[in-house]
Image (spheres, rainbow, N blue to C red):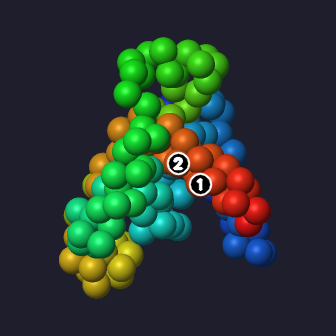
Amino acid sequence: MPGLAAPVEVRIDRWGVPHLYASSRRDLFLAQGFNAARDRLFQIDLWRRRGLGLLSEVFGERYLEHDRAARLFLYGGAMEEEWRSYGPDVEPAARAFTAGVNAFVELCGRRRQLLPAEFGLLGYEPAFWEPSDVAASAATDSTTTWARRSRGR
């Protein structure tokens, strides 16, 4: 995989759970992003679109209301301040993770057989990620969980 400073070992246990071993945090998160995209590209693309309010781009206008609501929760300030609020290790981890996701998305562009079938069925391509997309996706998950709990679900 491009970008690794040293080899990364991925072991899949008997339950199908990947275990990643790397000599640096950057390589670990880069491999984690690649592996997550390899295993669940369609799912994480949906999470990203949900978090950024972009579902209607691929699923039509019936998702406009959801997209509007999701965009209300998006952080509108400077990402430098947002990254600082998470702690010093989060931004580099998010950058490496998204580089790994993007490496797999690019590989799918060259080797179409790797692209999950859902993209072909729905007629769209997976998006490349920005590090801030990780924060947006996590924020949406948090607000969704909070909203469900506040309604007693």
Q: Residue at x 46, y 41 (%)?
A: 73
The structure residue drawn at horizontal position 53% and vertical position 58%, both measured from the top left corner, is 36
Residue highlighted by disc 1: 144
> Residue 23 appears at what percent x and percent y?
65, 33
Q: Is 86 in front, or is 146?
A: 146
The answer to whether 107 is drawn above or below residue 84 in the figure is below
Residue at (41%, 51%) from the top-left corner? 69
Q: How many marks?
A: 2
Q: Amino acid at mark 2?
A: Thr
Viewer-proximal residue among 61 and 140: 61
Q: Amino acid at mark 1?
A: Thr
Instruction: Tell which residue pokes out farthest to the front in this image.
Output: 151
CB of mark 1 within 8 Å of CB of mark 2? Answer: yes
Q: Secondary structure at mark 1?
A: helix
Classify residue 117 as left or right of residue 123: right
Q: Position of residue 30 (x, y in %)?
A: 51, 41
Q: Is 113 placed left or right of 79 in the picture? A: left
Residue in view at x 38 percent, y 28 percent? 76
